[in-house]
Image (cartoon, rainbow, N blue to C red):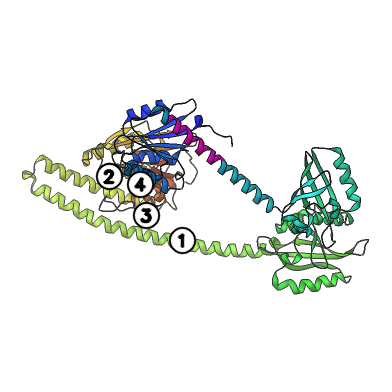
Amino acid sequence: MESRTINQATILLVDDRPENILVMEELLAKEGRTFLKANDGDEALRIALRNEIDLIILDVQMPGMDGFEVAGVLKSRRQTKDIPIIFASAVKKDNVFVIKGLEEGAIDYLYKPLDPAITRAKVDILLTLHLQKKELIEKNSRLEKSALLINNSADIIGIIDTEKLGFEEVNRAFTTILGYEPEEVYGAALNKIIHPDDLKMVEQFRQRYEDRISFETRSYTKNKKQIWLQWNVVNKGDKWFFNARDITTIKEAERIRNLLAIIVQQSQDATYIHNKHGDILSWNEGAQLMYGYTEAEALTMKIWHLIPHDLQPETQKLTNYVLEGGRLESHETKRITKFRNILDVLVSSALITDSSGEQSVAVTERDVTKEKLAGEQIRQLTIRLQNNIIQLEAANQELESFSYSVSHDLRAPLRAVSGYANILEESYAKNLDEEARTVFGTIQRNVKRMGQLIDDLLDFSRLGRNEVPKLPVNMAQLVERIITEFNQSTNHKASVSIHTLPQVYGDQSLLRQVWVNLISNAIKYSSKGKEPWIEIGANPGDDETIFYVKDNGVGFDMRYSDKLFGVFQRLHGVREFEGTGIGLAIVKRIVSKHGGRVWAEAEVNRGATFFFSLPTKNTAGKNW
């Protein structure tokens, strides 16, 4: 990260009087310096949390939160606690206020009117100290991370003096790999650990003075065990900065692979070699695909990682049989993968003896899980399918019975309402004024509409089996009619603006219900505002058209948006806004059956926007 200067700093100026902020900005202005401004405590807190601030100059006396309260909040939050604060006050100049300001975490207290020279000098000094502190913290953090990376590396990392080829620094991996404590090798030469023949090669590299060097050596641990190390060296001045990786296992695997050319590495079957102790010495691509372990992982494992616990005694007997000269052909057993899946396999294995007399076991395993399970899976799937069909038919019958019952129970009170309304209207027709006759007309229209809604809901309940009609729907006319009906039947105060709405394909009755539910929600949840408004529009696309209903009402917390479209889920209490909590669930169901989707965006007390999409083209022939 590049060091920043005081001219590149960001300063937050907080004062309830804009003219004071302007004066302060002109006083401290320098090329490249950024000023952020706030006229009250709440705004200052928001800006401080959203931006990287280097200094805050804070007026003490402000309406609402005063400067001391703002400083207290800033110092209590991890993100802002280290920002230096200077108080500036034209009124509270007594020592008691200065002390309170310092107790709240300020580093200075200025009196208005400000002395330009002193103010500039203090600000420059404080910014310099703050930026130097931040830079020092960042450097220390990077150093700590580097030290952790070095000391936790699995590779040996260190420094060698090229003049003597002696060790100056090594990390903990030196002890892990070679057995020596760092104190035992500081100042010691490379010949302490490197094979004499390979030491000659290292000496030749030293004399070349190349910037980067890579080589491999045979090396010895403290207990005289030979291992292989791969060295990568950066030559800088008279020092070698190196890392050395233990590649003994890889070298041994290479040796085994060269000796056993008969192993087909590209076989889709798992082919590997293990010694008499069960250590895996080679691992082909088929084994990696079958068991999930990479070659690097497998070469650190024993074969028992692949064998279920209850089969390990049997496997040990079979391994002993092969080590005694026997041969295993297509033995059926089970194996376990890296992801704990059990496989059915056919195992073949044979004994291999290299030129030094070392014995190993070559194993080939074929996964027959799919073949073995195919018949059983087909049988189980057939049974499940038959059971599902029976359950589905029963569920459909129950749904039809339930729908018929609900329809009957709903229609009876509707007929009663309609009948009594007719009786009243006919009996008292001479005594009814125009307003009363309008009310009776509204009752009859709503009874009729409720009856239609029952029919629509019954049709909707059968949508799980029936295809949604895909007929042209003029959305503009549909929404205009709905708005007109709302205007005539309700006393809402919302102003409604309707943008261009394209034609879609679907069921007009169901889509009408979508618009009615969304618009009525917008009217309801914006009704308590002073100037409620509703905006309706669409965004056509190649594959889908997105419709929306936007309002400036109470909105909601987006953390609970997943509850919106559930049945009987409400984000506002019944006392606050009436409703059953089923309207948006119906919207989601209808739109989903049309091949679309539904979602919402909102902010508390800043309104909400509900979106739904419908396919742009007529997908006749598709079952939505």
Image coords of residue 529 (percent x, y): 26, 40
Label 1 environment density (alpha carbons within 10 Å; few <14, some 14–19, many ≥20): few
What amino acid is at disc 1?
Glu
Q: CA distance from mark 1 to mark 2?
A: 41 Å
Pointer 2: what residue? 524
Query: CB atoms at circles 1 and 4 under 8 Å apart?
Result: no
Image coords of residue 345 (percent x, y): 74, 64
Q: Nearer the viewer, mark 4 or mark 2?
A: 4
Q: Nearer the viewer, mark 1 or mark 4?
A: 4
Q: CA distance from mark 3 to mark 2?
A: 19 Å
Q: CA distance from mark 4 to mark 3?
A: 17 Å
What amino acid is at disc 4?
Phe
Q: Is residue 507 above or below residue 268?
A: above
Pointer 3: what residue? 567
Pointer 1: what residue? 393
Pointer 4: what residue? 556
Q: Earlier in the sequence, mark 3 or mark 1?
A: 1
In this view of the protein, can residue 514 be seen by the observer? no
Query: CB atoms at circles 4 and 3 under 8 Å apart?
Result: no
SS at mark 4? Answer: loop
Residue 404 position by quadrant? bottom left
Residue 128 magenta-highlighted: yes
Q: CA distance from mark 4 to mark 2?
A: 14 Å
In the picture, which quadrant includes the N terminus? top right
